[in-house]
Amino acid sequence: MKADIATNYHEEATPLETKRTMPMSKAIAFFILSLVINSAGNVLTLVTSTQIRPSFLGAAYWTAAEANMATAVHWNLFWTFLIIGFLTAVLNAILIHHWDWKRITGNMIFMVPFSALIQFFENFFLGQYPAVFTGFPVAHGWGMDLLYVALNFLGVALIATAISIYQRVNLVLHPADDLMQILRFRYFKGQAAKAMWASYIPPTLMAIIALVITRQFTNFGLGTLFAFVAQGGITGIADKWVFPKLKHQALDVGRDVPVKED
């Protein structure tokens, strides 16, 4: 069904650049909520993976590929994530056929509160605030293994839901999520799952390059596979069922083709 991105559903497709119809205070509230959900989901996948011995869950797809690339080129994670984020923002500009410093700056700004929340939730889930939560213990037995697999998958679902929310709010985006949104509406007729799979091409290439350099294949596992298969679909479902009245705001993925949501 075709969609009017900023308001509601209509029969005619709308341009790929729309205006913001939501009050800024409400948009900021949705954005903050989505950041918290995304950060918690990311750390949940990481912590549950490390608390199973031997680890077989793995990290989220982009995270796994970037960590492997950091090992291959001997960079720390901060610079690896920052440089790859900037290069992804450049790719986004190429895909929408125009350069937008405001958009790219927003991509970079996104990483600051996101990184801070990642650190907070890592401390929380590992028991650094024992008065509130003593942390996830190392898994002992198949029962805890199954619980951690379920929590890992829940983390992926939280990431996908958060992406749905902050893509619709569209204040600032992580470069990888901006890439997914551009692919979704410009090239895949609003289909979230196909766009997500296509957005995994850059990290897949990074993982292959890292494998060639290091001869090691780490940070990928069952949870990574689940994210690869299901995250885009969950984002599409969340668009319809999580805050269903929240429509895509100020969408700009190019000005020369129509768009529709699945």
Image: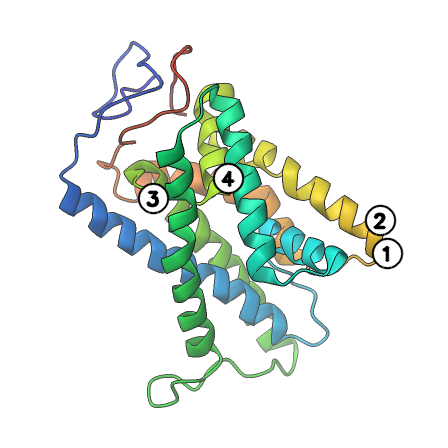
Q: State the residue at coordinates (45%, 21%).
A: 98
The secondary structure type at the circle numbered 3 is helix
Q: State the residue at coordinates (65%, 63%).
A: 57
Question: Which numbered disc, 3 or 2, marks the residue that appears first in the sequence?
Answer: 3
> Could you tell me residue 134's position as x and y percent?
43, 87
Whether label 3 touches label 2, CB < 8 Å: no
Q: Which mark is residue 215?
A: 1
Foreground: disc 1 or disc 3: 1
| Location of residue 158 with respect to 187 vertically, above or below | below
Q: Amino acid at mark 3?
A: Tyr
Q: Amino acid at mark 1?
A: Arg
> Could you tell me residue 235's position as x and y percent?
43, 41
Whether label 1 touches label 2, CB < 8 Å: yes
Foreground: disc 1 or disc 4: 1
Is residue 173 visible in the rendered image? The answer is: no
Q: How far is disc 3 from disc 4 in space, using C-alphas?
A: 14 Å
Question: Which numbered disc, 2 or 4, marks the residue that appears first in the sequence?
Answer: 2
Q: State the residue at coordinates (26%, 38%).
A: 244
Foreground: disc 3 or disc 4: 3
Instruction: Tell me the residue that label 2 is attached to.
Output: 212
Q: Amino acid at mark 2?
A: Val
The secondary structure type at the circle numbered 2 is helix
Q: Residues within 10 Å of mark 4 (few under 14, many from 20)?
A: many
Q: Residues within 10 Å of mark 2 (few under 14, many from 20)?
A: few
The secondary structure type at the circle numbered 4 is helix
Q: How far is disc 1 from disc 2 in space, using C-alphas?
A: 6 Å
> Position of 245 compared to 194: left or right?
left
Instruction: Tell me the residue that label 4 is attached to.
Output: 232
| Location of residue 233 with respect to 212 vertically, above or below | above
Whether label 2 touches label 4, CB < 8 Å: no
